Amino acid sequence: MQTPSPSKLKQRKRRTRMKVALWIIAVCCVVVLAIVANRLMRQGVVELAMRTPTWTCTNIQIVAGVELSRDSIFTLSGCELNRPMASYATKAIEERLLLSPWIQSAEIVRRPPNRLDIRIVERKGMAIVRDGADLAVSEDLVLLPAEGKPWKNSLPWLSVNLPFARQAGPMSERDPLFPVAKEFAHVKQIAPELADNIAEIYRVDGNWGAVTMNPVLSVTIAANIANENWLALDKLMRETSFQDRLDSNAVVDLRLPGFVTLQLPAPQAEETQQL
């Protein structure tokens, strides 16, 4: 059998590599065309649904929390069944929903030929405004109606001694309670276990303070309290040796940056611990 010359072997290898490369290119083209065709088909279905007056919405799927009923969401969104799919402007529906203080975010999606999806994330109260107005404050500083809510008795108080007209909706930065609520929201972020143990944060005549529940303890704070002071108190509150030195008249002072000062009644001496 005659052995092919080296030049012919090189040509065969080149042709083989070329065939493999062409196959790879062909497969890639088929995959790309399939993806593009799928997207165009889906877009075409959506466009068809938006342009076809006979396609009406017969199903509205709502996913939400516990504060808003299905009927209230229908009212807020302005959506009704058995209307043409083209009439549901998703951006306008979202904007109407976000007018409610309870709704933190809303996602509206049209699902041709006949379904509309509404997904809502509700706000939750983190504290109660202690002014008799039955309002709660969310972590993003929005006032929520709390009248008749079973959870309001388990939330801490936020207090100031200056009057201000409040109503449900985003808090005004001119509200004397705004910096107090902002500070408590910050504590919930950096020391959530400590925040859960706080019964009240207040500002009275320019003096800031807090009261904890377990153990019952008065805490003197500053308007610009440092993070490390909150974190140090959070750590100390979980130490048995610290709790053993406390009584009902003990006061913790966090106003000095870098220090936690425990003020004990006589005959016990004042103790200062550096962070």
Image: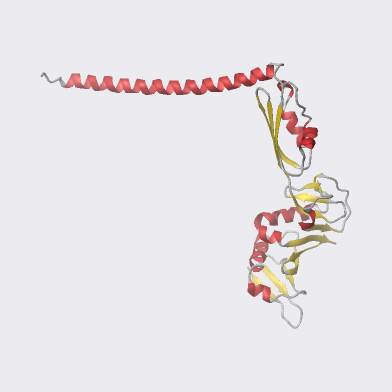
Residue at the left extreme? Answer: 1
What is the tally of numbered marks visible in this picture? Answer: 0
Q: Residue at x 75, y 69 (%)?
A: 216
The quarter of the picture where the N terminus appears is top left
Q: Position of residue 25 (x, y in %)?
A: 39, 22
Q: Position of residue 57 (x, y in %)?
A: 71, 24
Residue at the bottom extreme? Answer: 267
Q: Position of residue 269 (x, y in %)?
A: 72, 80
Q: Is residue 266 above or below residue 51?
A: below
Which of the 4 image quadrants contains residue 11?
Answer: top left
* Drawn side of residue 248 relative to residue 133, left or right: left
Q: Residue at x 73, y 20 (%)?
A: 84
Which of the 4 image quadrants contains residue 249?
Answer: bottom right
Q: Is residue 71 above or below residue 48?
A: below
Q: Nearest the camera: 264 or 198?
A: 198
Q: Residue at x 65, y 72 (%)?
A: 273
Q: Nearest the camera: 115 or 89?
A: 115
Q: Residue at x 45, y 23 (%)?
A: 31
* Drawn side of residue 187 relative to residue 147, left or right: left
Q: Position of residue 135 (x, y in %)?
A: 83, 50
The quarter of the picture where the C terminus appears is bottom right
* Drawn side of residue 6 relative to residue 18, left or right: left
